[in-house]
Amino acid sequence: MSEAIKQHFLTKVPDSRLQIQLNPIPSQLRLSPCRNPLQVKLPFHSGQRITAKVSCNQPRWSLFVTGTVKHYKTIVVATSPIVKGSRLSAGKLTLREREISNLRGDYFQRQQDVVGRVARISIGTDTAITPRMLTQAQAVQRGDPIVIEARRGSVVIRTEGIAQENGKEGEVISVLNRRSNIEIRARITGPGRVQVP
């Protein structure tokens, strides 16, 4: 039965490792061995605790089993304390196997998905990094020199400007065109780059 439950979890989270401990089945049940693969449904799953419905169609029987599942996966964790508001660098991150059953929300499996983001909260050493802990870094700071792009069909016109506001990629900010000395609104397309709509 534990093997059938293990397969159920591994199809949902591949490349992971499981430890399953099922509570004993009462000996008075005397179930006949199943001739076909067992069917598993997990209607109740809260963190490590599970209640699974295990069914056999030949001979026909089903029962509920309870137990605990520890689910391990290699994820991104902090190698040292990360201060709120600081930008995450590769030197502060590593990949480690962690028990993921009790993690609230998602987690990261690749360091490149985290590097460059900013800590929304202070993060302790050896803590799993989750999306809720991070925010996008400012792509442009007020006063930064930037490149302004305007597209007209296949033609791209570029000029220099100065950011008048902080902003993240995708946001629209005020920019001073250095040539014309006119302030315009433009969308941030990357660090130090904006595009006029």
Image: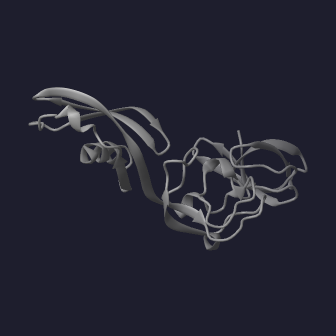
Q: x and y percent of residue 2 in the render?
A: 28, 46
Can residue 135 be seen by looking at this rendering? no
Question: The N terminus lies in which quarter of the figure?
Answer: top left
Residue shown at 74% from the left, 58% from the top: 192
Residue shown at 31% from the left, 42% from the top: 8
Residue shown at 37% from the left, 54% from the top: 18
- Considering every residue shown, the one lying at the far front of the view is 28
- Based on the displayed image, in which of its 4 quarters is residue 117 positioned? bottom right
Q: Compared to 63, does 92 lie above or below? A: below
Q: Is residue 137 left or right of residue 103?
A: right
Q: Compared to 172, does 20 lie above or below? A: below
Depth order, front residue of 120/104? 104
Q: Please name the colour scheme applied to the rendered image.
A: one colour
- Based on the displayed image, in which of its 4 quarters is residue 153 positioned? top right
Q: How many marks?
A: 0
Q: x and y percent of residue 97 in the render?
A: 47, 63
Q: Is residue 140 left or right of residue 80?
A: right
Residue shown at 78% from the left, 58% from the top: 84
Q: x and y percent of residue 128 in the render?
A: 59, 58
Depth order, front residue of 185/85? 85
Can residue 56 be seen by looking at this rendering? yes
Depth order, front residue of 67/24? 24
